[in-house]
């Protein structure tokens, strides 16, 4: 007799990613509402934006299981502007 046991997940992966993106957005808002400024706050907000972009590409654009150029295009699309913005923040402080 072949029986399949299915695990019930409390929350689906895409829902967990969505909730984490909402949480990162809320933290970003709270950083701005608290009036935090300076290099550390700016780089933290930038890092949150890059993380959210990576999650968006992986889970909602369906690129998590891909190999090759499409995955690199999204990575470079996030990394190059992020590195340039971080460099501008670091040089201006």
Image (tube, rainbow, N blue to C red):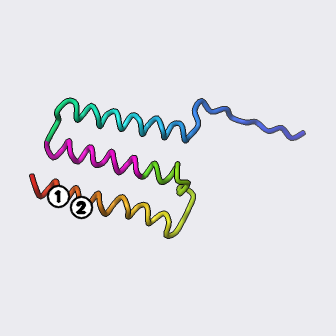
Q: Residue 39 at what x, y percent from top left? A: 15, 46
Give the position of the N terminus as an image quadrant: top right
Q: Is residue 63 left or right of residue 1?
A: left
Q: Secondary structure at mark 1?
A: helix
Q: What number is the disc on residue 84?
A: 2
Q: Say if 74 sits above or below 18 in the image.
A: below
Q: Residue at x 53, y 55 (%)?
A: 64
Q: Are marks 2 and 1 in contact (CB under 8 Å)?
A: yes
Query: Is 87 a magenta residue?
Result: no
List the residue tagged with mark 1: 88
Q: Residue at x 16, y 54 (%)?
A: 89
Q: Is residue 3 left or right of residue 68?
A: right
Q: Is residue 3 left or right of residue 8?
A: right
- Region of the chain picked out in magenta, as a range: 38-53
At label 1, counting other C-alpha atoms closer than 10 Å, the crowd grade (few under 14, some 14-19, many 20 or more) is: few
Quarter of the view holding residue 74 = bottom left
Q: Say if 11 sits above or below 48 in the image.
A: above
């Amino acid at each position: 007799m072949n029986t399949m046991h299915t695990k019930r997940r409390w929350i689906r992966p895409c829902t967990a990613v969505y909730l984490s993106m909402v949480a990162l957005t809320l933290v970003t808002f709270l950083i701005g509402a608290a009036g935090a400024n300076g290099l550390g706050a700016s780089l933290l907000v930038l890092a949150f934006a890059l993380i959210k972009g990576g999650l968006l590409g992986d889970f909602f654009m369906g690129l998590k299981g891909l190999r090759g150029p499409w995955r690199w295009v999204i990575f470079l699309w996030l990394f190059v502007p992020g590195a340039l913005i971080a460099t501008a923040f670091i040089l201006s402080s």
